Amino acid sequence: MADLILENLTIKYGAVTAVDNLNIHVASGEFLTLLGPSGCGKSTSLFAVAGLNHATSGTIRIGDRVLFDGDAAHTVPPEKRNIGLVFQSYALWPHKTVAENLAFPLILRKIGRAERDERIKDALGLVEMLPYADRYPFELSGGQQQRVALARALVYRPPLLLLDEPLSNLDAKLRERARVWLRELQERLSVTTIYVTHDQAEALAVSDRIAVMSMGRMRQLGTPREIYDHPADSFVADFIGSSNFLHGTLIEVGTDHARVRLADGREVTTQSGPAGADGAVVVAVRPEKIELTDQEGPNTLRVSIEQRTYLGSVWQYAVRSGPLAFRIQTPSELLQKEVLVRIPQEHSAVFPEQASAS
Amino acid sequence: MADLILENLTIKYGAVTAVDNLNIHVASGEFLTLLGPSGCGKSTSLFAVAGLNHATSGTIRIGDRVLFDGDAAHTVPPEKRNIGLVFQSYALWPHKTVAENLAFPLILRKIGRAERDERIKDALGLVEMLPYADRYPFELSGGQQQRVALARALVYRPPLLLLDEPLSNLDAKLRERARVWLRELQERLSVTTIYVTHDQAEALAVSDRIAVMSMGRMRQLGTPREIYDHPADSFVADFIGSSNFLHGTLIEVGTDHARVRLADGREVTTQSGPAGADGAVVVAVRPEKIELTDQEGPNTLRVSIEQRTYLGSVWQYAVRSGPLAFRIQTPSELLQKEVLVRIPQEHSAVFPEQASAS
Amino acid sequence: QEVPSYYPTDYSQIIEGSRSESGLMIYSNMADNNWQPLIEGFNAKYPWIKVETVDLGSGTVHSRWEAEKGSSARTADLLVSGANDRWAAYGQDGSMEDYKSPEAQHLPEFAQPYPGVNVLSTDPLVITYNAALLTEEQRPTGFASLVEAATADPSAFEGKITTYDAARNSFGLAAWWSYMDKKGDAAWDGLRKIGPMIRGETSGGPMNEKIATGEYVMGIAVSGITIFPRLEQPGGEILGFAFPDDGTIMMMRGMGIPKGAANPNSAKLFVDYALSQEGQTQVGKGGLVPYREDVAEDQVRYTFQKISEQIGEDNMVIAGFDERLITEAQSFVDKWNEAIAGR
Amino acid sequence: MTDISHTGSTGLGIDRSRAIYWGVAALTTVLVIGPIAPILFQAFLDKPLYDDSAALTVGNFARLFSEPGMIGIFFNTLYFGGLTMVVAQVFGVIMAVLVGRTNLPGRQWLGEIFIWPLFVSNLVIAFGWFTMYGPSGFVTLAAKTYLGGAPWNLYTVSGMGIVAGLSQAPLTYLMCLAAVTKADPLLEDAARSTGAGPFRALLSVTIPMIRPAIIYSAVLNFVVGIEMLAIPLLFGGPSGIQTVTTFLYDAGINAAVRPEYGLVGAAAVILLMLVAFLVWLQGYLMKSSGRFVSVRGKASRPSTLELGAWRWPAFLFVFSFVFLTIISIFGGIFLRSAVSFLTPLIPFWKVLTAANFELVLSSASYVRSIINSVVVATVGAAIGTCLILVIALVSRRSDFRYSRALEYVALFPRALPGIIAGLGFFYAVIWLPGADLIRGTVAVLILAFMIRYIPVGFGAIAPALAQVGEELDRGARISGADWWTTVTRIIVPILKPALFSCYALLFIHFFKEYVTAAFLYQPGSEIIGTTMLQLVAQGDNGPVSALATIQVIITAAFVILARRVMGAKIYG
Ligand SMILES: Nc1ncnc2c1ncn2[C@@H]1O[C@H](COP(=O)(O)OP(=O)(O)OP(=O)(O)O)[C@@H](O)[C@H]1O
Ligand SMILES: Nc1ncnc2c1ncn2[C@@H]1O[C@H](COP(=O)(O)OP(=O)(O)OP(=O)(O)O)[C@@H](O)[C@H]1O
Ligand SMILES: [Fe+3]
Ligand SMILES: [Mg+2]
Ligand SMILES: [Mg+2]
C-alpha cells in the first residue's frame, strides 16, 4: 500500500469542531497511534479515513488515490476503500453468530468455503475465541465481543487497519498478549495501521509513531521516545506519563541548561527551555524519574510523604515541599515521614507556565 | 449499611455456568474489586447483586435483609435495592440529555428541584462533564458517555455502588484522577463498593480487597499485597502482574525455602511450596523483581536478550537461558546482548506444575 | 330457437348475432342470490351467452359505467339499478340504446318510461315494526295512522321511528319525493308532526337490525324485499310488516342497454327474457317483485298486482323516473330537512 | 472547475445502489401520482373528469367553503380524528409495552385477540358495537338492569371517536410492538437499578424510546380518523352529526342527485395539504434521530421486565379491557352470524341457524371472493412489504439526494379517503396506457391496495429502522459491502419483527378492503369486501356477520401461523 495522507482535515458537527486542521502522513506499513484524552476527536478522525463520516474540508489520500476531497466534493464510499475497522462499540451484527460475523466480509470477497472456514478459524484462534464460534453476540461478555470485533476486522486482511480502542475491555494479560500479537501480525502482514488508544503504555509499547491530540488539534507527532522524553509542550508532558509540574521562576537560561527558582525557594538546574512573559515556568518531571538520595546536593528537595499507594510493582507517594505538591514512584515501601529526593537534570523539562497546565 | 454477603452463588445460562458457587463477604464501607480475565463472570455476579439477572441458586443478603434466596425463590426487585450501578456498556438513556439522565433517579427519589440541580452539577463536575449537560448521549464520545454513566450512578448517593469497568474507556490521566477521586469519594461517603475491572494496576491501587476470579470460580480473595505478594496459585500469580514461570524440579523443600533445579540446569533457592506428583514445579517470579547483577552467585542466571520493548518509564526485555524464556523489566536501556540476572528468593514462589499455567 | 309468435320475424338475427358476441356484462345493484334464478333461466335458453354481473351500489353502477364508456375498457352491456335520478337523466339525454322489447305489449304502461329505459321490478316500501314492542293496537297501518299513533303517545315513538333519509340518500329521495308529490300538503303536515321523532338511515341493514333489537320500534318506507325473506326465518315473528294502507311506495328498478354497448344482441335477448312471463317469474323467485300481469302468484312471494289488490290501486305510489327528481331535488331536500326538524 | 474532472467520478456514480434509489423513486412516484393526479385535476373541473365539456374552475373550493355548517363539520372532523388518535395511542401503546416487554400472564393470547378489530372492516366493527353498546344493545340493557343506567352514548362524536379509536388501537399496537421488542433491555435495567419500579421504567424509558413508532402511528391514526367513513356514517348519520367524509359521501359521491366529483376533488386537495403538514411535523418531531437508537453494536440480552406484584392486577385490567371492547364485540358478530335475529327480545338459542353460512358458501362467486381475498392478501402483502421496505431503506438509510421527498410521496396515498382513492385508481387504470392488461384482475387490486397502504406498512418499518444503530451499517460498509448488500444482509434480518408487523398489517388490510375495490373489480376478481358490500345491500346482517366471522378466522389463523413461522426467533 502507498502512504496514507491526511491534509488539513477538519470535521465539524454543527457548531462543534471535533477535528481541526489535522495533517498526518502515515508511511506504508507504519504503526501509528492516535493518543489523546477522551473526546479529543480520535474516533472522528478514524471514521473520516474509513469514509464513515463526512469531513467538512481537507483531503484524504492513499498515495495518488484520493479518498476524500473537500474541495471537489469527491468521496469514495467506505466499501470501496478496503479498510479494516474495529469500532469502539464493537458493532457486531446481533443476528449473526460469531462465525457468521466473520464470514460476511469473506463472502463479500467471494472467498471459497474451505478457505473461508480456514481463515475464520485462524482469526478466532488468534483472539482465543474459537470455542465461541457458534454463539450470538448477546451471549458473550463485553471483552469477548471486543475480541470478535477485532477478529472480524482482521479476517479479510485489509491493507489498512483502523483500530478504535480495540483492547479497552480486555484484561491486562490478554491485552498484553494481544498487543504483542497485534504488532507481530502488523509487521508480518506489513499492514498500515492507525491505532486509537487512551492507554499511553500501550501506545508507547506498540507504536512506530504517536500522534498526540487534544481538542481536535494535533499537539505532537513523533516516535514514542521523542514523545516521552521530549514532549513538545506541557500538555504532552502531562498526558504522557503524567508528569509532575513544579512551579517556579526562570533565573538563568543557557543553551544546555536552565536554572529555576522553585516555589519553595530551592533552586534547581534543568534542561533548557522558554519562559512565560514574566519568567514564570513549570518544571516537568515524571514521578518515576525522581530519585531518592541520602545526601543533600544540587537539585535535591526534602519532602514529606502525604499519601501512599500500592501499585504492585511500585509504590507511589504523594509528597510535599512547602507549596510544591508532587508524586514520586519507587519500587520500595517507604515508612519514614520525610525523604530526600533529587530531580535529575536530564529528566526535567521547562515549559512556560500556562493556565491550562495543572 | 450492613455487610453484603454472597453465599454459594451459582448462575447458569443454559449449559454455561457463568458463576460457580461464589462466596464473598463484603464488609460495610469496603472497596472490593472483582478481577479476572474476560468472560470469567464478573459482570454476571455484579448483575446478580443488582437483581438484574436471576441467580440459579445461593443467597445474597445485606446484613439480615435477604435480597435473593434460591431456595425460598425470593427476590427483591432491583429498584428496591437502592444500589448504584455503572454498566460496562454505559446504558445511558438515548432519549434523555446528560442532565436528564442524571435527574431521573433524583426525581424518582422526590428530590426538590433546587437540590436536584445542585447535585447534578456536583456529579457532572466530578467527572468533568459539566459543559455537556445538554447534549444527548449519541453526541458524546465513548469516554464521555462512560463518565456520564458514572455520574448517574453517584448522583443519588446509594449505599452500595457496583461498578462494571467504569473507567475502561478513559484515558490514563483521567483514569488516574477518576480512581483517586472515586476512592476518596468512597471513603468520604463510606459507600460499600464492588468494582469490576480487568486492569490489575487499578485494582491494586484502589481496592481494600481483591477477589480474583477465573471461569466463574473465585481463586483468591485478599488485600492487594496478599494477592500480589502471596498469590494462592499460579493462575493468580500469572494474572496479577504477569509472573514469569520457570519450569523445574523440586530437589529439596524446607519450612522457609525450597531448592529447585531449573530446566536450564541451574539450581535456585526459592520460597517454600508444594510440588506436583513427579516433583515438577514452576517458579513464579515477576519481571520487575528480577535484578540485574554484575557477579555470578546464588540464584543468578546468564541470559541473552531476545526482544526489547519501550514502556516509557521502564524497558521490558524478553530473555532466554537455554529452554527458559522469560521477561525482565528495568528502568534502564540495555544495549548488550547478554546480561546476568538474579532471582531474589523472597520474590519467588513455587507452585506445582499444571497444564493450565502457561 | 323457439321464440313466442309475437316476436318480430327477424328476431333470429339478434339470436344469431349474440352467438358471435363475447358474453354479457351487467352492472347492477342486486346481489348474487337475486340474480341466480333469472340467469339460470336465461342460460337454459341461450347457453352460449356467458352472463357476468358486477354487483355494486346504485350510484356506483352509473359512476363506473359513465367513466368507462369513453375509454376502450370493457364495460357494461346492460345497467340495472335503483338510481331513479340517473334513469331520468338518461331518458333526457338519450344515452340508452332505444330498443323496444317485443314483450312491451304485454306490460303495463309504466314499463318503459323513456325510450331505452325499462323497468325490471317494482319493489314496495313497507312499514316494519317490532312485534314484541308494539302491541296490536299500537301498530300503524299507514302513514296517517303512524302520525296519529305517534302524536298520541310520543314517549313510545320518540327517536324510535326510522326511514330512509331523503336528504342523504338518493333512494330515499326518490321514494319520498314520489310520495309527497302524490300526497301533497297533508303528508307534509304529518311529516312535520313526527319529523323530530325520526332517525334517518341510509341503508336497509341497520334499519332492520335496529328494529329487531328494539332500538327503533318501527320503520316506515323500509325496503320490503329486505324484510320478506326475514319473516320466514326462525324468530321472524319478532318483525311485522304492513303495506301502508294510505300509500305504498313502489320503487322501480331501471334497466337499460347503453348506446355503443359491446354486446348489444346479448343484451337485447336478456332484456326480452327478463320482461317475458318466464323471466318475470324468475325475477320474483330471486326475491324481487315482478310486475307483469301473467306471472302466477303462487310461484312468487308478491307481485305488483297482488299488492295492488291488497291496498287498492289508488294507494300505490309509483316511484318512477320523473325528471323533476333532478330539477326539484334541492328544494325538496330543504323542505324535507325542515319537516324533519318539525318546522 | 472543469467538467472533465467530473466525468471520472460520475462514471463510478452509476452503481447498483444508485440504480435502486432512482428505480424505486421513479416507481413509487408513478404508482402514487397515477391515482392522485386525476383527483387533483378533478378538483379544478366543473364537471366530471370524463365529461368532454368539463372546464377549469376554482368554484369547487368556493362551494366547499360556502357550504352552511362547514365550520361545525370541520370541528367535528378534527375532534373525531383527534379522539380516535388519542384513544388508539393510549391503548395501543400500553398493550404493546405490556405484551412486548413484560411477563403479563397470558400476554401471548391477549396480544393475538387485541388485533382482531383490525381484521374486519369498520362497517362490521360499528355493527358489533351497536349490538352491544347501542341504545338497546346487550351490554347497555344489562347495565340498565343491573347498574340502573348506561353512561355511554355511541351516537355522539365522542362515542364515535372512542369506537374508532379502539378499532385503530391494534394498528398502534402492532407498530409499537415491533419497536418495543427491539428496545435495549439494558436501558430498563439501568432505570430499575436507579430505583424505578417496573411501570416507571416502562413509562420513563421504554415508551420514550419507542417515540418514533408512537409519533408515526399517531399521525397515521389521526389521518385514518379524518378519512374514516363507516363509523361516522353509521353512528353519526341518524342523529345528524356530519364529518368531512360523511359530508363528501352524502353530497359528493352518494348524492341524492348526481355525484359532485368536483367537490370531492377539492376536499381531497385539502386533505393532501393536511397530510403534507403532518408528515413535516412528524419529521420535525423526529429530529436528531440518534436519540432513539437502541440496537447498538454492543449486544445486550433480550429479556422481559418482571412486573412482580403487579402481574395480576395488570392482567385483570388488560383482560377486562379486552373482554369489554373486543371479545364482547366479536362475540356479538359471531353470534349474529349464527342466528336469524340478534335481539335481546328473543333468546338466541331459539333462532340459531346455519342459513347465513349456507348463503355465503353456496354461492360460487362468494366462495371465489374468499379465495381471491386470500390470494390478494398473501401475495399482495408480500409484494407490498418488499416495496415498502425498499422505500423505507432508501428514504431513511441511504445517501440518496431525494430521500426525504420520496418519503413524502410515499405517504400521500393515506390522505385520500378510501372511496376517493378508489375513484382515482379507477381513472388511472382506465386512462393509463397499458393498464388495460391488468384491469379487472386481482393484480390491479393488489397494486391499488399496495399503494393505498404504503403509509401503514411504512409506519411499521420506519420506526424500527430508526432504532438500529448506524454502526451496524458502518461495520458492513467497511467490511466491503455496498449499500444494497448492507441493507439486505445486515439491516433486514435485524428488522425481522418489523417486517412481520408490516406483512401482517398489509395482509389484514388487504383482506378486508372494499371501498377501493368497488370500482376496480370485475367478475372473477371479486373479493370478500365486494361480496360484503352486496350482502349489506340485502339489509340482512346475518350473512355479513357470517362473512366477517370467516374473515376473522382466516386472518387469525394466518397471523398466528405466520408468527410461528416468521417471528419465532428474533435474534437468530
Ligand atoms: N445470555 C448468555 N447466554 C450464554 N452465555 C452467556 C450469556 N451471558 C453471558 N454468558 C457467558 O457467561 C460468561 C460470563 O460472562 P460475564 O459477562 O459475566 O463476563 P465478564 O467477567 O464480565 O467479562 P468481561 O470482562 O469480558 O466483561 C461468559 O463466558 C459469557 O460468554
Ligand atoms: N454526533 C455528534 N454531535 C455533536 N458532537 C459530537 C458528535 N459526535 C461526537 N461529538 C463530539 O466530538 C468530539 C470528538 O468525539 P470523538 O468520538 O472523536 O472522541 P474520541 O477522541 O474518540 O473520545 P473517546 O476516547 O472518549 O472515545 C467530542 O467532544 C464529542 O462530544
Ligand atoms: Fe468542475
Ligand atoms: Mg472514541
Ligand atoms: Mg463484563
Image: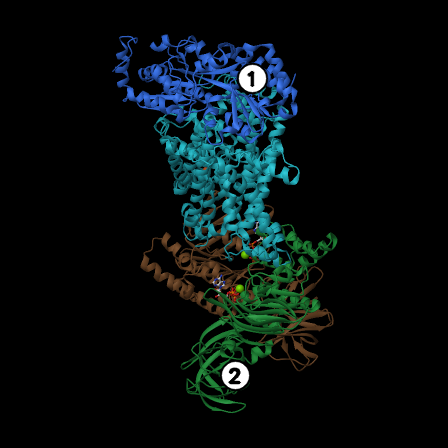
Chain colours: A brown, B green, C blue, D cyan
Callout in the foreground (2, 1): 1
Task: Give the quadrant of the C terminus of chain D.
Answer: bottom left
Q: Residues within 10 Å of mark 1 (few under 14, many from 20)?
A: many
| Residue at (53, 85) in percent of width and height | B344
What chain is tagged by disc 2? B
Rendered image quadrant of residue A133: bottom left
Amino acid tagged 1: Gly
Rendered image quadrant of residue A296: bottom right
Q: Taking D503 as reference, is C97 above or below it? A: above
Task: Say whether residue A230 is visible.
Answer: no
Lateral position of residue D94 relative to residue D487, left or right: right
Find residue D529 and name its label.
Answer: none
Lateral position of residue C44 relative to residue B186, left or right: left
Rendered image quadrant of residue C37: top left
Q: Are marks 2 and 1 on the same chain?
A: no
Measured from the top left, where is residue B37 in percent x and y?
Answer: 50, 69
Q: Choose between D284 and A61: the one closer to the eye.
A: D284
Measured from the top left, where is residue D123 in percent x and y?
Answer: 51, 32
Residue under label 1: C142
Q: Choose between C86 and D479: the one closer to the eye.
A: C86
Task: Say whether residue C327 is visible.
Answer: yes
- Label 2 to label 1: alpha-carbon separation: 118 Å
Q: Choose between D258 and A269: the one closer to the eye.
A: D258
Amino acid tagged 2: Ser
What chain is tagged by disc 1? C
Q: Mark 2 near ligand 1 (CB under 8 Å)?
A: no
Q: Choose between A78 and D325: the one closer to the eye.
A: D325
Lateral position of residue C314 relative to residue B1, left or right: left
Residue under label 2: B348
Query: Which secondary structure lies at badge 1?
Result: loop
Measured from the top left, where is residue B157 in percent x and y?
Answer: 68, 62
Q: Taking C7 as reference, is A130 above or below it? A: below
